[in-house]
Amino acid sequence: MQRQRRRFQMDEGENPLDYATSERDRGTMAMVKQALSTGNVALAFQPIVSARAGNPVAFYEGLIRLFDETGRTIPAGDFMGVVEDEELGRKIDCAALSTGLKTLRANPSLRLSINMSARSIGYPSWMNILKKFIRLHPDVVERLILEITESSAMQMPEIVGIFMEDMQDKGITFALDDFGAGQTAFRHLKEFCFDIIKIDGQFSQNVSEDADNQVLSEALFAIARHFEMVAVSEAVETREDAQWLVDHGVDCLQGYFFAAPSLSPPWKAKKGDLLTA
């Protein structure tokens, strides 16, 4: 009992809430490390559909999922923000890229986007995974889309720009994720030459009735057209919002109105077989 009291003893002046948060984060990080070391990882797939009639699938996004020792999903929101600047974040990017490339190789008709941090460009293990597939399976990487968040890209725009130019020569497509959520320097947007911009979901919410979101969405579509990029509206959740976005020029849409992320490959599953995650 005395040992247990020492274990939970806080430093003098430490805020109890901060202490509890720190303990929770340490526990979550331990589960994340174990999941990566044991290979308890998978991708959940969500379709990005075309605005054309019938909404055919343009490509899928592969979202990393990590599982604890009982098989339960570790909520991404519990660790993604914490690991962004840590090596653990780079290892998560490695797992996502490796799993995504293997999925592409096994499905020759598939196009798949995978999230990455700009920091992974300088991480040897991540680059080695990518370069190996470029060397051995160039047809596979030609169907790969790498998504970089706006906030991540703006941390090191020069490095990202050079990396993109090199990889685009190899056939890789690039998407700027969460566009409009941060402080984009538009001169960098011009220099980057992204192929796709994924417009942050805040602009899709209630866009069929919200005049502010309507004006902002149309402006973002215009930017995409000017720079010859495909515009994707994220977090589309209602038929009315989807229709407004289609009517006003979006190229593709993503969100729960069309499908939730699924651990079962949607391109293989029969109706009713999908396991969401």
Image: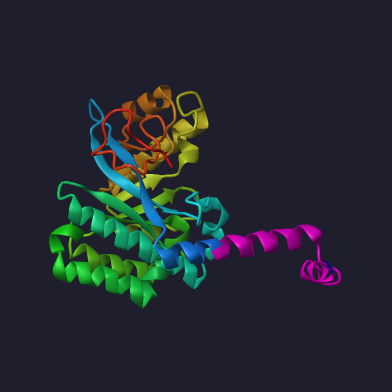
Q: Residue at x 69, y 63 (%)?
A: 23
Q: Quadrant of residue 129?
A: bottom left
Give the magenta-colored segment's residue range: 2-30
Farthest residue toward the bottom? Answer: 124
* Residue at 43% across, 56% down: 149
Dominant secondary structure (helix, strand or loop) of the stretch shown in magenta: helix
The C terminus - image quarter: top left
Tell whether 36 sits left or right of 194. right
Instruction: Check the picture and name the quadrant holding the N terminus.
Output: bottom right
Can I make out residue 143 in this image? no
> Residue 13: image x %, image y %?
86, 69
| 118 to 112, vertically: above or below | below
The answer to whether residue 48 is visible is yes
* Residue 208 versus residue 72 in the image, above or below: above
Based on the picture, tell me whether residue 14 belongs to the magenta stretch.
yes
136, 203: nearer the viewer: 136
Q: Percent from the top left, x then y, of residue 268? A: 23, 39
Name the residue nearer the viewer: 127 or 197. Answer: 127
Identify which residue, 42 or 241, lies in the foreground: 42
x and y, in percent, of residue 112 in the image: 27, 50
- From the viewer's perspective, is 5 left or right of 217? right
